[in-house]
Image: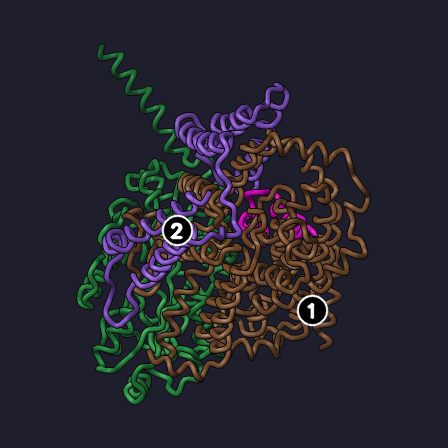
Amino acid sequence: MTPILAGFSDILNPATLLWVAAGVAIGYLVGALPGLGKATAVAIAIPLTFALPALPAIAFLIGIAKGSAAGSAVSAILLNVPGEPSSAPTALDGYPLARQGKAGKALKAALFASVLGDLGSTLALVVLAQPIASYALSITPVEICAVLLFSLTFVAGLSAQSLAKGLVAACLGLLAATVGLEIESGLPRLTFGDYRLFDGIPLIPMAIGMLAVGEMILQAGNRAALDQQGAAIARGAHPDDSRMTREDWRRSVPAIARGTAIGIGVGILPGLGASVGSFLSYGAARSRARDPGRFGKGAIEGVAAAESADNAVVPASLIPLFALGIPGSVIAAILIGAFMLHGVAPGPLMFAQQPRLVGGIYAAMIAASLALLVIGLTFQGLFAQVVRVPTRLVVPAVLFLCVVGAWLEGGGVFGVQVMLVFAVLGVVFIKLGFSVVNFLIGFVVGRTFELTFRQSIQILGRDPWNLVQHPIALMFLALTVLAVWRFSRGARRAAPKPEDP
Amino acid sequence: MRATETLTGLVLALFAGVMLVWIIPAEIPRGVAGQLSPRLVPQVAVSGILVLGLWIAGAALVGGRLPAHRPGPFSRPELVALVVLPALVLASIWVLALAGPVPAGVLLVAGAALLMGERRPVALILLPAGSLTLGWVLLYRILGTTVG
Amino acid sequence: MLKSLKLAAMIALAAASPALAEWPERPISLIVGFGPGGQSDLLGRALASVMTEDLGVPVNVVNRPGAAGGVALAGLRAMPADGYTIMLNPSQTITLTPALMAQVPFSIDDFAYAGMITSFDIALVAPASAPFDDYAGMVDYARAHPGILYAALSATTRVFATEIARANDIDIEILPVDGGPGMVNAILGEQAMLAYSGGVHHRYPDQMKVIAALTTQRNLGSPDVPTIGELGLPIGMDMQSVLIAPAGTPDDVIARLQGALAVAADSPAFRQVADSMSAAVQFRTAAEATAIMHAQLESNLAIMQAAGVQPQ
């Protein structure tokens, strides 16, 4: 234990602290820009990690991951443009709050929830990495497949108030995810002979198109009304509108606690990802609420639920990496590269061979949580002014950033074309009452879902009766049936109510 | 509104039918014996869309109850933006190939600002200048890549 | 008339030769056909920093992910052959794709090869807890336990399992996995008894063991383990990191690139990165690389044809 404690003191080195803060700041600021996100921030970071010693390099990358997860909430709240699909539920309540002149409050709720979710998950990593890890190994693709099926149904039922439309969007997302080379046989599917589609439709340009460009098109179409609102926001400002009141905290604390727990659970399982975590958390908060009608119109706990889970996924996804050497997420896979570069093999041996480094990484992660709080609070006042910028200036700037982001992550012109196609599709979706986010969730988990389904067939030896050996999978299958039953009944009873797209 | 719902459902069902009958057989190989067909998941997804599309159309036709969603009709300015903004991006990609990144970026940012009704010359100069500088710093200085 | 022609020729020469002699005079883009952070990216960046020093101009890494470098190769093909756009990629994208796909938007002749720098230790691996230690033991175990699972990353990698199963008349089932991390998960979680590894197993020396090398020469990282060819099945396929330029790149530029590659192979900084990635540094000249690429393509096509794999 002592070397780990010694590692904790390593973090007090000013240079290391500086790199943690720099990582969080770059992640937060790049994540806050619409159209740019984690991928861009990581691309900025990787060349720098070459020149750094092991601890600052790893701390820097972790700072980037944590900062960008929190930063993507900023554009979600202020512009209704989620920086990542995982921040889409944040926008559901954050943007209405911002349009009510409560941008400051929403940004603080998102930041506090991010920091608390992050800190809780980091502590879980520190305390539980070893015991949880052995549990993670017993999770086979069979369980993952069942969890994915449940998540898809649950999210489809929640975010669209008509289960049929939610499921259509999810099915379309699944269909879009099958474009490209099929993973088992390597055969091309639905590529229409276009080689650029062999790796599938690139996610980031697609998400930028549907979430950001589509929203900009709608805002451009409604700019007169939006600018009027903006002027009204500038006139009447109440101090309570830009801070968390006691009442806000009372509503948010349970949502944050639940969101952190959900984020940790989702983070440990490979292939689920932050989007599933934040949506499950948002859905859980809504279904637990006494007055679910407030959700979608500016419920502060909706913002808190989504962001706490979004950020809790990041440290939790490192649990399989640290304890077993299994990269469970994209950021974990990138971290492996950084570890290897510095001669450290991530995995159980790391605790025995490099305890001091492990202690340093833990301390850096906690420091990153605190840095996130400080950096977030510093920049929020500035960000909140974006609400007052007229649409005629917002649209060109956001459009430019979107094109840059799609260019970077989609391999040039092709990325921009993908972005445009899905922007138009996204507008049509929203106008017809289909959830863009259900489509994206279907797309994001579609590949993993199909892969784990194929793996399950092999692991079960093509005999469904072998499912009996997988009680967790059976439990989630039962929950899926329950969710379908509940949502189809709920839809029958629910009175028509206006919904924010 | 009810007509929109019915039409939406029918269009979805038609799309699913075309996918099932023509596009999936033409675009996805049959696969190898002894493993799940590559066509299976697309077929399941499309079948789901077919059934649900018919359900949406039927529910709007038969049931008096409208779904909780209101399909908002397109307003004229929205339709204009839906055509004009993507067209602007396509135009700037075209200019990128012809004249390079700076004219393309200026066209994109200044063009969008003009379309949004910005007429102040200062804003029309500063916004593109600021955006392009940011883009240049990010792409050329920090990431070391090129555009064009 | 003659005089002016002569003058024009002299001007042309004067304009052309310094441009070539002075290559490189502006920054070079080194394309990596994978996203940032992976093995190819990190090797590319390490190479770029050595080349920057050696060539005296910035060498910038540009990530163009897609189809294991295929998307980037299709783009590279159309770039000017002036040495300012080059690419580092695993050789199999060029030497194996034609065996699997009917339509490939590039061919081996679209490129010039400036040399090779690392080779991949491709191997058949098993979890450390597996009740067998070598190929013969694995075959016996599979005969007693039909249907053991082999984790395959792609259609190419499954060919090894189907060929081994056919040659020994045993039953090996395929567990499809998603890339190297998916393979690690399947082996560490003991969901699969066998797996294809592109070299990642060196990072898990206590959790994985090597059953056979799937290359034509023994793996540099495990020289005691025989190749699959030595074990009686000539289906080994090699893979190297090769430095690629568009076809028609001037010979002196290629020579200069080859020189930079040789410097990188001897540079401690590059070796450290390569070692950490478990990539074996093995320098090959431009001439050797070109010959290896053509031989590799022929051998791979023959193996896949014998296995009954048709390009789709």
Left or right: C104 as drawn, with respect to C185: left
Q: Which residues are magenta?
A: A21-49
Q: Position of residue C15 (x, y in %)?
A: 36, 24
Q: Colour scheme in the image?
A: by chain
Q: Position of residue A246 (x, y in %)?
A: 81, 56
Decide whether residue A44 is among the magenta residues. yes
Residue C23 visible in image: yes
- Relative height, residue A285 to residue A381 (above, below): below
Residue marked by disc 1: A123
- Relative height, residue B56 to residue C196 (above, below): above
Task: Name which residue type carries label 2.
Answer: Ala
Q: Position of residue B143 (x, y in %)?
A: 53, 43
Left or right: C229 as drawn, with respect to A260: left
A175 or B64, which is in the foreground?
B64
The tint of chain B in the picture is purple
At 26% from the left and 76% from the top, the residue drawn is C164
- Relative height, residue C270 to residue A400 (above, below): below
